Image (cartoon, grey):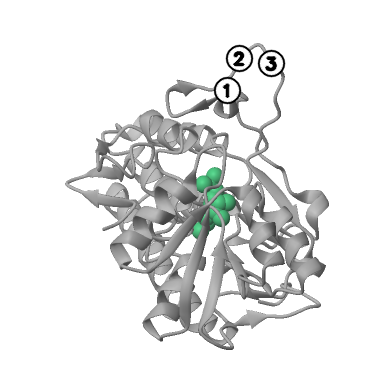
Amino acid sequence: MYSVEFIENKLKILDQTKLPFVEEYINTDDVERISQAIEKLEVRGAPAIGITAAYALALSIKNSTIEKIKNNFYSAVNRLQITRPTAVNLFYAIDEMKKFFEENFNKKNLYLLLIEKAKQIHSNDINLCERIAENGLSIFKKKSNVLTHCNTGFLATGGNGTALNVIKKGYENNLIEHVFVDETRPLFQGSRLTAWELEKLKIPFTIITDSTSAFLMQQNKIDLVITGADRITLNGDSANKIGTYNLAVLCNYHKIPFYIAAPYTTIDFNSSDKSKIKIEERNKKEIFKIGNHKITKEIYQAYAPAFDIIPNELISGIITDAKIFSKPYNFINV
Ligand SMILES: CSC[C@H]1O[C@H](OP(=O)(O)O)[C@H](O)[C@@H]1O
């Protein structure tokens, strides 16, 4: 299974808002519909939205006349660029596709070439996921109880995932005792998506509320924490799902290793530190409801940042496709 697949000249998106109860797909070749799928988190996860954008850019010229190719392509660039601001993988993929478009603009079969480029970005991520998982094995000093936050499995990537793929590989090597899964409010990527993936993988897990992690740490029930990232700056400051900073601070207090797993496509080589990271702010209504069920009055004030920032000093190691980086982090020459 994949979060997204390119089949019969359309993008097939597994609608993650319907999981874990319904496996329903969005089949489309329309850039606007794909952009909305990213904004509504029907497809989500830093690498997955980059891959999705790459296919969308190829599809943007699928039925173009020669005269309209440039306008259609760059309109799609502009539309996709404003979908979600934090995951740098989105902008990495857009830049890769733009460069390829400009280099091959005069070629007759440009649409097919762009599709092949998008497929290359997709298959590259499949490979990066596996290398992250292999590199991550060394973080397990014994059979461990692991806590993770949000969703970082195949639903969030083009392959088998980042942090959740490290957990998968660890389990396959008899290094995982149990996985604690933060539900991850307000959109429940943990209790809906990570739980669904771990069920499929037959890995033992327990869902907890986001506020339970501290109590588990206090009882010495967590051996390590591993999460993903949406943007990592050159000095290792990292943005990830809201609530990750809480975990990093707790790990520091309880002397529990805190790891981040991410491919190089999540490293922002243009940003020196956390001051440069733009945090997506979502509609406050996402806090006021669970699914379609309202839980309080929408007239109330609320604040819904989708991510927070983990300063590099709280990160025990950053597991990438190249290796595990340690402090002091410096990704300039990666
Ligand atoms: C492997 S990247 C997963 C990353 O993306 C998630 O954010 P969202 O669900 O809003 O796309 C979360 O930050 C995960 O760590």
Q: Position of residue 123 (x, y in %)?
A: 35, 66
N-terminal label among 3 and 1: 1
Amino acid at circle 3: Tyr
* Relative side of 107 to 87, left or right: left
Q: Nearer the viewer, residue 57 or 143?
A: 143
Q: Which residue is mark 1?
A: 285
Residue at 51% across / 84% down in the picture?
A: 143
* Residue 90 appearing in the image: no
Amino acid at circle 1: Lys
Amino acid at circle 2: Glu
Of all residues, the one furthest to the left in this rendering is: 8
Residue at 54% across / 79% down in the picture?
A: 144
Front: mark 3 or 1: 3
Residue 298 got which mark? 2
* Label 2–label 3 contact, CB within 8 A: yes
* Label 1–label 2 contact, CB within 8 A: yes
Q: Position of residue 281 (x, y in %)?
A: 66, 33
Residue 246 got which mark? none
Q: Alpha carbon of mark 1 to alpha carbon of mark 2: how far?
A: 7 Å
* Residue 300 appearing in the image: yes
Q: Which image quadrant: the C terminus?
A: bottom right
Residue at 70% across / 25% down in the picture?
A: 302
Q: Which residue is mark 3?
A: 300
Q: Position of residue 164 (x, y in %)?
A: 46, 66
